[in-house]
Amino acid sequence: MRDAGGRELDKTVNLRGHLDVLLSSGFINSWACDNDRPLQPLTIAVLSGGTEIAFAIANHYRPDLADAGCGTGWCAFRGRLVVPVSQLRGMPLSLHEVGTGQVLHNVPELPELDMPVPPASTVGDIIAQDPTLLGDISRLKGCGRVLDAFIRQHGVEEFVGAAFLYVLNRPVDHPALTAYTNLIRQGHQEPLNVLRELADSAEYRAKPGTLVAPCHPSFPFRDS
């Protein structure tokens, strides 16, 4: 595989991406991820005829991407177009990963969707559009592989301790550490379900915290 300039690419790089749709409000919706390093968001560019028309970081959440196993699901982007949508109708477009120059997707043309700019009038709207904030624990559903890797590297007890600090913002108590550690080791509890239980606990609901998203540098289950 070669990049846009014809240079041979590192075959160990496992990048994926797709151009989805043009928006009448002047944006392009797409996604891109590194399946080998799903917590590292990709910087991408969209080109038309060799000219860059959009630039973005692919770090927003989409549940359909999580369901499809595209990274952790936190790999979508909405890039602002630098030219009017009308100039791109019927034009070929290509999706590029900036770091490697790899072409992830080529299309002869993209469909256009009549969609206004999303509102940001409430706290919920702002959180939903901020890629550094989780918003809801269900948005970790694509992180099972990441949590399993953390446990392989650091151990079950370290994971349980990190889970309590992440969700409840406190150290884990000994009874809970023993209980959750045994459940995970015996295969009776998935790591992701531990996070869900903590987020659904009376303790968390009494004092809900703002959880960082997987792409945030302080997400505790990142590769060390």
Image: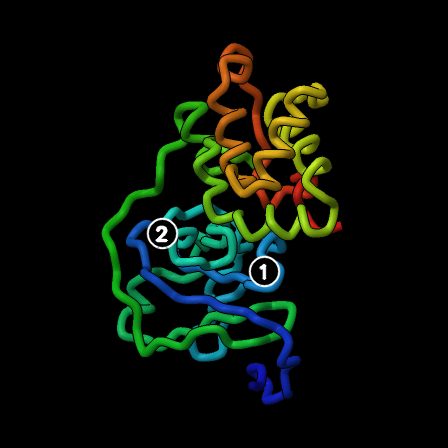
What residue sits 66% from the left and 43% below the top?
221
Q: Looking at the picture, which amino acid does disc 1 mark?
A: Thr
Q: Picture coordinates of residue 44 (x, y %)?
A: 54, 63
**Residue 131 makes an appearance in the image:** no
Dot label at residue 43: 1
Q: CA distance from mark 2 to mark 1?
A: 21 Å
What residue sits 36% from the left and 33% below the top?
119
Q: Dot 2 lies on which element?
A: helix
Q: Is residue 53 left or right of residue 25?
A: right
Q: Is residue 49 above or below residue 72?
A: below
Q: Is residue 75 left or right of residue 106?
A: right
Q: Residues within 10 Å of mark 1 (few under 14, many from 20)?
A: some
Q: Looking at the picture, which amino acid does disc 2 mark?
A: Asp
Q: Quadrant of the N terminus?
A: bottom right
* The image quarter in which residue 42 lies: bottom right
Q: Which residue is mark 2?
A: 64
Q: Is residue 177 above or below residue 206?
A: below
Give the total of numbered labels: 2
The coloring applied to the image is rainbow
Q: Residues within 10 Å of mark 2 (few under 14, many from 20)?
A: few
Q: Picture coordinates of residue 189 (x, y %)?
A: 52, 37
What residue sits 62% from the left and 27% below the top?
179
**Residue 64 makes an appearance in the image:** yes
Q: Dot 1 lies on which element?
A: strand
